[in-house]
Image (tube, grey):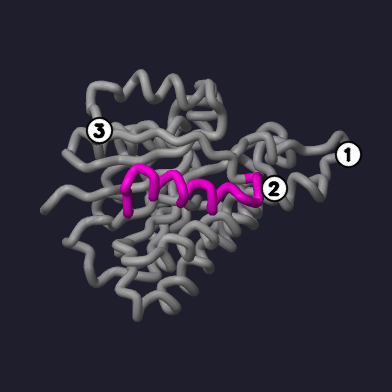
Amino acid sequence: MKPRTILITGGSGKFGRPLVNHFLAAGDRVVTTCRSAESLEKIVVEFAGYGEGFVGIQSDFTDPAAVKTLLEQLDGHGIQPDCLVNNARSISFLKIEEDGLVARENFAGEFLLDVIVPYELTMALVMQKNSQLRSVVNIGSMYGTVAANPHLYTDPARQSPLHYGVAKAALAHLTKELAVRLSNNGVQVNCVAFGGVEGRVDEAFKQRYAQLCPMGRMLKEDEIVGPVDMLLSDRCSAVTGHTLAVDGGWSVW
């Protein structure tokens, strides 16, 4: 398979960094975005050894002009991605108020980054002159398929924000809509609904998670990349509009 040019938004995060590292190591050219200059500087240093194979761009997608500016920067680098991974998000929008409710601005912010920006960026790349885009993967969650299990959390309202799952469910449906609407453009659109990944939780949480999951454990970080790579590969050329559950069986029961 020839090298791909892959745009991965949110490249400095828990999912983004392993994805960037994997595709660079596979010989692909990777362009990634980071919201802050500090995050961008760190990831540029980390992947400096890949030379022109890696391009980092600062982009804050809460800015209404962010997608337009990003495309202008891509044009400036002479880059036309053939693959897109919509992964950018901000945990700041997951804040819960003291009364246990979700503030309107946080609900809207989560929906903006999980649904509106993936739509805008995908369509902008499709509408580029001489567009090369052929495959899109949206990073979703098991909570876009099933509601949060309160037995997993000690404080469910705060530890599993309602609007996160609602936005991820909308992303799964956006995946279907775009798969249909972009089929004549030769663009596949899929989604990966990940389960919980180790790294940010204590041992007690991991044990509760294991008891509620058929696989008996959380995902490992190195299990993030395989499903995304598969959906972007030529081997999955007949797959579109699909949300792939990568959750150890969590959503089965």
Question: Front-most of 197 and 211?
Answer: 197
Is residue 74 magenta-colored? Answer: yes
How far apart are labels 1 and 2 at the CA level?
19 Å
Query: Which element carries disc 2, helix, strand or loop?
Result: helix
Residue for point 52% across, 67% down? 174
Q: Residue furthest front?
A: 76
Question: Front-most of 212 and 31?
Answer: 31
Q: Is residue 250 visible?
A: no
Residue for point 38% across, 24% down? 44
Check disc 3 and give the amino acid type: Glu
Range of residues picked out in magenta: 62-80
Q: Which residue is mark 2?
A: 109
Residue for point 60% across, 59% down? 116
Identify the mark nearer the N-term, 3 or 1. Answer: 3
Query: Which element carries disc 1, helix, strand or loop?
Result: loop
Is residue 14 magenta-colored? Answer: no
Q: Which residue is mark 3?
A: 52
How far apart are labels 2 and 3 at the CA level?
33 Å
Residue 102 spot, x, y in % from top left: 79, 46
Identify the mark nearer the N-term, 2 or 3. Answer: 3
Q: Is residue 30 visible?
A: yes
Q: Which residue is mark 1?
A: 99
